[in-house]
Amino acid sequence: MGDGLRRLARYGNAKSQTVRLLDTAGDTACKEAGLRPTKIRQCGEWLLFRHYHTKGQTKLRAANFCCTHLICGFCAIRRGARMMARYLERFTLARGKKPFLQPYLVTLTVRNGDDLRERLDHLDKSLTRLHKRRHGKRSRSLLTAVQGAVWSYEVTYTEGKGWHPHVHAVWLAADLPDQYALRAEWEEITGDSFMCDVRPIAPEQAEKEEEAVIDPYAKGFAEVFKYAMKAAELPPKVALDAYTVLRGRRLVRSFGEFYGVPEPANDDLADDIPEEELPYIDLLWRYAGEGRYEHAKTVDRTCEHGQGRSDDVVL
Ligand SMILES: [Zn+2]
C-alpha cells in the first residue's frame, strides 16, 4: 500500500489547501465568482481505493469529486493524472507506427502583464501563428519537423509583476528542435518575448528491479498535465479573478499525432479498473481534517470472488 498511502498524503494536502483558500476567500466572494463552495469543501471527503496485491497496484475506484479543477487541488491532480494516462497511451500508439519519433518538452512564454485575459489571448494567438507554420511546402519554420504536439496553459502570478502565462508542450519530432531557431521565430511572432525552452524527455529507468516504472515517459509528460494554476498559493481575490478568466477556456490542446484524444469527462476522475479478474481489497478512507485521511472500512476479495471477507462496505 506504499503507493496508496503516498497518494492519500498528496490528496489530503491538496484538500486542506483548497479548504484554506475557501475559508480565506469567504463563501460570498466564491459564489460571486460562480463557484459552489459547499460542493468544493465536500470534494474528496471519502475515497475508495482498490488494491491489487498480486500486481502491486492501487487504483482510486471512486470518490466524490467537485469537478472544479481550477480551484480544487484534488480534482486538479486527478484530472492531470487522467489526461496524462490518455496521452501516454496515444504516444505509445504513435511510436508503434513511427518509432523514430522522440518526445521533447517545450516551454513558451509571453511577457508578464496585469491583464490576464489580454496576456492569454496574446499567447493563444501567437501559438496559433507558430503552429500554422508547419503547413506550407515552402515553410522554413522548425515546426515543419513537428509531427504532433499537446500543450497546456499555466498561469503564475507575482505581486508587482503581474501575470505570467506560459505553455508547456510535448512535441514529437525525429530530432531535437533547435532552441535558438525557435526563440527567433517566437520573438518574431510575439513581438515581446523570445523565452522558450526545449529539452528531450528521456525515458526513466526503474532504480530497483522490483520497482516497476508505470510508464518511462510519465515524469516528462507530467509537466504538461499538472494544474493550470496553483490557486491555493495565490491571494484569494487573485485566484477568484483568475478563475473567472480561465473557466470555459480550453486549457489542453493538441495537433497531429496527439490530435483527438478525448478530455476526461468532469465526473470521470477515478482510475480505470483493470478488465481482467484479479483478487483485490477495497479500502474506504474518510477525510479527518488537517490534510489527514483515516481508514473507514475494508472489503477483502483476495480469495475467490464472492467468498471474500467483508466488514460491510456498502457502496
Ligand atoms: Zn474537487
Image: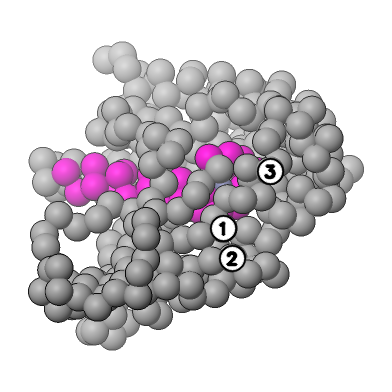
Question: Residue 92: horizontal and vertical position, in percent?
Answer: 20, 49
Residue at position x 69%, y 33% in the image: 35
Is residue 166 rendered magenta in the image? no
State the separation of the CA atoms marked 1 and 3: 12 Å
Q: Which class describes the residues within 10 Å of circle 2: few (<14), some (14-19), or many (20+)?
A: many
Is residue 77 rendered magenta in the image? yes
Q: Which mark is residue 38?
A: 3
Residue at position x 33%, y 63% in the image: 59
User: For the residue marked with disc 3, what is the amino acid?
Assistant: Thr
Q: Which mark is residue 45?
A: 1
Mark nearer the N terminus (1 vs 2): 1
Viewer-nearest residue: 199 or 208: 208
Q: Which mark is residue 256?
A: none
Viewer-nearest residue: 269 or 174: 269
User: For the residue marked with disc 2, what is the amino acid?
Assistant: Tyr
| 222 sits to left or right of 310 | right
Question: Residue 215: horizontal and vertical position, in percent?
Answer: 28, 62
Check whether the beta carbons of the residues at disc 1 and disc 3 lie within 8 A of each other.
no
Question: Does residue 258 lie above or below 22 as drawn?
Answer: above
Q: Say which residue label 2 marks.
A: 287
Secondary structure predominantly adopted by residues drawn in magenta = helix
State the separation of the CA atoms marked 2 and 3: 15 Å
The secondary structure type at the circle numbered 3 is: helix
Question: Does residue 166 lie above or below 89 as drawn?
Answer: above
Viewer-nearest residue: 21 or 172: 21
The secondary structure type at the circle numbered 1 is: loop
The secondary structure type at the circle numbered 2 is: strand
Question: Residue 305: horizontal and vertical position, in percent?
Answer: 13, 68
State the separation of the CA atoms marked 1 and 2: 5 Å
